[in-house]
Image (tube, rainbow, N blue to C red):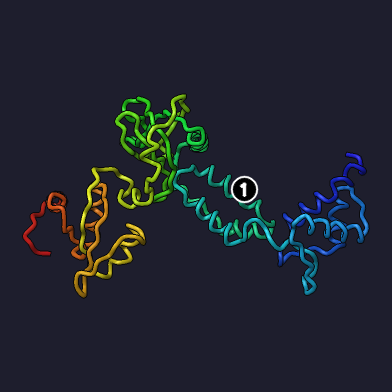
């Protein structure tokens, strides 16, 4: 490449070196910058480097001159700080809905958002856990098509999969296509979910995105606008235990006071807590009744009680009796 052309790229190479090689602990002196540019066949004088640094500052890059050792110029502000990148990297590494390979690729891309030295710090703390990673390599394509459909107000069709005993993903409904009006994708319980209107029966349902494959965008407009216009997605999630669906009912419960944090974590900060006595409080919430809800409640032991409705109390007792029966035990009224 002609040297004259490289001269035109000089300011871009300077921008690159500040972004990739400098930070507070790794500044570069003007002689260092001149040597770096010389590697690209660009000869410059000190004054030219000073002028170019000022141009980059005017452009918006916050470049400072560190006078104490190690001295030199470095880029102060980046799009993401080190703690922000660490949080994003940890989120990627722990994400179960993408594959191990996709996790590693995303981590590498995040490393390019900081200096080489800071990237090495991130690498030293990186550890993609492969044990619970997804196996669906179509996940990116599915997300893209779902987002495109929502933006275009269109329905989608897809195959929905589940694990069988041989540890293979098999299509549900014998491979029949699901038709859904998609309205929201939500992260919950370490998984990504699509919430939408099931066109077959006209009710709100959710689907694990990593179990969705072969998504197609349909020509039909979405249904459910009246339902989702003021839909409380947070309340839907908090009332759906483990994202397992069930018939919704308003349930009143009583808890020992030390479970306040557990209740707020589960149902959100807006839930009303009503003191009953010095040691207990009550609350009520709209719950999707399922074995997962009963299992969560049982995990709180004797410190949690269903107050009403009576049919849910009886179902919970039946759940506990069946659980004891699995161990060949009968409930004798004692704990």
Residue drawn 26% across the image and 47% down it: 288
- In this rendering, would 286 be left or right of 145? left
| Residue 136 visible in the displayed image | yes
Q: Mark 1: which secondary structure?
A: helix
Residue 265: percent from the left, percent from the top? 35, 60
In front of the other: 121 or 140: 140
Task: Quadrant for the C terminus, please.
Answer: bottom left
Residue drawn 55% across the image and 55% down it: 126
The number of callouts visible is 1
Residue 64: percent from the left, percent from the top? 77, 66
In front of the other: 272 or 149: 272
**Quadrant in the picture for residue 78:** bottom right
The residue wearing badge 1 is: 109
**Quadrant in the picture for residue 55:** bottom right
Residue drawn 40% across the image and 37% down it: 225
Residue 231: percent from the left, percent from the top? 37, 45
Task: Quadrant for the N terminus, please.
Answer: top right
Residue 34: percent from the left, percent from the top? 87, 57
Vertical order, 246 against 127 (above or below): above
| Residue 168 visible in the displayed image | no
- In this rendering, would 157 be left or right of 72? left
Residue drawn 92% across the image and 43% down it: 4
Disc 1 crowd rating (10 Å Cα; few below 14, some 14-19, many 20+) is few
- In this rendering, would 329 be left or right of 143? left
**Quadrant in the picture for residue 207:** top left
- In this rendering, would 62 be left or right of 107? right
């Amino acid at each position: 490449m002609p040297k004259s052309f490289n001269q035109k790229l000089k300011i871009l190479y300077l921008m690159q070196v500040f972004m990739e090689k400098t930070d507070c602990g790794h500044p570069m002196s003007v002689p260092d910058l001149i040597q770096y540019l010389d590697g690209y066949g660009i000869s410059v004088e000190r004054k030219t480097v000073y002028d170019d640094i000022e141009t980059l500052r005017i452009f918006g890059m916050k470049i400072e001159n560190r006078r104490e050792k190690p001295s030199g110029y470095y880029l102060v502000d980046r799009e993401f700080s080190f703690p922000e990148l660490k949080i994003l990297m940890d989120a990627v590494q722990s994400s179960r809905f993408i594959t191990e390979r996709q996790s590693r690729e995303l981590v590498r891309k995040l490393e390019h958002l900081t200096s080489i030295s800071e990237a090495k710090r991130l690498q030293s703390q990186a550890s993609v856990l492969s044990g619970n990673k997804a196996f669906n390599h179509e996940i990116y394509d599915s997300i893209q098509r779902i987002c495109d459909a929502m933006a275009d107000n269109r329905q989608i069709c897809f195959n929905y999969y589940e694990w069988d005993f041989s540890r293979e993903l098999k299509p549900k409904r014998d491979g029949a296509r699901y038709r859904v009006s998609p309205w929201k994708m939500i992260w919950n319980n370490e998984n990504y979910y699509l919430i939408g209107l099931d066109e077959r029966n006209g009710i709100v349902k959710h689907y694990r995105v990593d179990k969705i494959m072969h998504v197609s965008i349909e020509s039909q407009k979405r249904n459910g606008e009246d339902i989702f216009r003021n839909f409380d997605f947070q309340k839907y999630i908090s009332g759906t235990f483990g994202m397992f669906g069930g018939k919704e009912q308003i349930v009143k419960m009583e808890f020992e006071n030390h479970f306040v944090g557990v209740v707020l974590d589960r149902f959100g900060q807006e839930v009303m807590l009503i003191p009953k006595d010095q040691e207990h409080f009550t609350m009520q919430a709209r719950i999707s009744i399922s074995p997962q809800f009963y299992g969560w409640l049982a995990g709180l032991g004797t410190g949690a009680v269903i107050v009403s409705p009576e049919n849910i109390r009886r179902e919970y007792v039946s759940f506990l009796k069946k659980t004891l029966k699995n161990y060949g035990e009968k409930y004798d009224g004692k704990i």
